[in-house]
Amino acid sequence: MIDHKERVKAFIKLGEFLREYSESNKKDHLDTPNHAWQSKLSDVILLAGHKNGWFTEDNINFAIRSWAELLTTENLEQWLSNYDLVKNKHKTVALIMAGNIPLVGFHDFISVLLSGNKALVKLSSNDAILLPFIAEFLVDQVASLKEEIDFTENKLENFDAIIATGSDNTSRYFEHYFGHKPNIIRKNRNSIAILTGEESKEQLKALGDDIFRYYGLGCRSVSKVFVPKEYKFDGFFKALFDFNPIINQTKYANNYDYNKAVYLMSEFKILENGFLMLKEDEGFSSPIATLFYEEYSSVNDLKRKLLSDSNKIQCIVANGILEDEINFGQTQKPSLTDYADGVDTVEFLLKT
């Protein structure tokens, strides 16, 4: 018999712990109730950064703070109240995690466990440190979860359903091998912003968070902007100036230099400010340190285009243009009901 309340309680405790960590002095956790766990988390963050150069302490801490804000009693109970969890048939759900940003697969992980199922997790080598630590903390809160969380590096076997996240290329592999099982298989998606030229400096600066957080590696990172014809980027570049320290990150700088060289040798027209390049391109997935842009003639034409390309888009940042738009600066702050690709993971699990 699955005790849903006990599972929820474990994640509430996790939220309290992460908030405690975020609010305390990162260098000295001796005065916190969970000082041993706090100290261990500091070590885990350091190790994750060593394993993956994109996982800076700032970005990992941002991910931790984001989950700390979501994992409250009120948020969890409100989210789960939308579902009849008692009807769930206990199953083992395989999770193939991406590794592009810290804890990117955590929403799938929490959905599987709180819907009353077992998680069989295959981690990306790029993000193999943080989630096992969190699982260890959860098991410490509710010992029965030990039998409900299994990390494996081997071939996935003995599971009832699968949720796999990867690229367009890996999705074909996933569909070939796992298509006979109930599944959610995710492909490449990117986020965009629609500018009208009427944006304030504050809105454009907030857009910088959508562009630069996690170095643009997330599916919720804005990789392209749509602008009206003859749009002037001077104000756009000025509003983003405070993000210029990003060029001091070696991996980002190397990508900037490499992509700039490719563009120049190919005689592509680019605009740049020393830490971000703008390239006119009809694609959605821009390289690191590059933001694609495309001009539009009318908002209605743009809406039709975006509707036809909806399977390529995760988030749309805009102001008063679309019903499901996201405010500037908010793409990296999803709620518990913001499901990847718009597919309700918990509903899928309950029906499987």
Image (cartoon, rainbow, N blue to C red):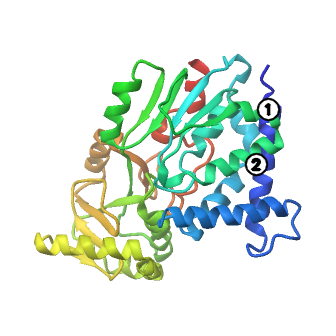
State which quadrant residue 235 falls in.
bottom left
* Residue 207 is at least partly visible in this image: no
Question: Disc 2 vs disc 1: Cβ atoms closer than 8 Å?
Answer: no
Where does label 2 land, which residue? 137
> Relative to 291, is 82 above or below?
above
Where does label 1 land, which residue? 144
Q: Is residue 214 left or right of residue 272?
A: right
* Residue 174 is at least partly visible in this image: yes
Q: Residues within 10 Å of mark 2 (few under 14, many from 20)?
A: some
Looking at the rendered structure, the kind of residue marked 2 is Phe
Q: CA distance from mark 2 to mark 1?
A: 12 Å
Looking at the rendered structure, the kind of residue marked 1 is Ser
> Where does the N terminus fall, quadrant-wise?
top right
Q: Residue drawn at (37%, 25%), measured in percent from left and top? A: 177
Of mark 2 and mark 1, the one earlier in the sequence is 2
Q: Is residue 285 left or right of residue 280?
A: right
Q: Residue 287 or 147: which is nearer the viewer? A: 147
Residue 244 x/y as whole percent: 43, 81
> Where does the C terminus fall, quadrant-wise?
top right
Q: Residue 225 or 94: which is nearer the viewer? A: 94
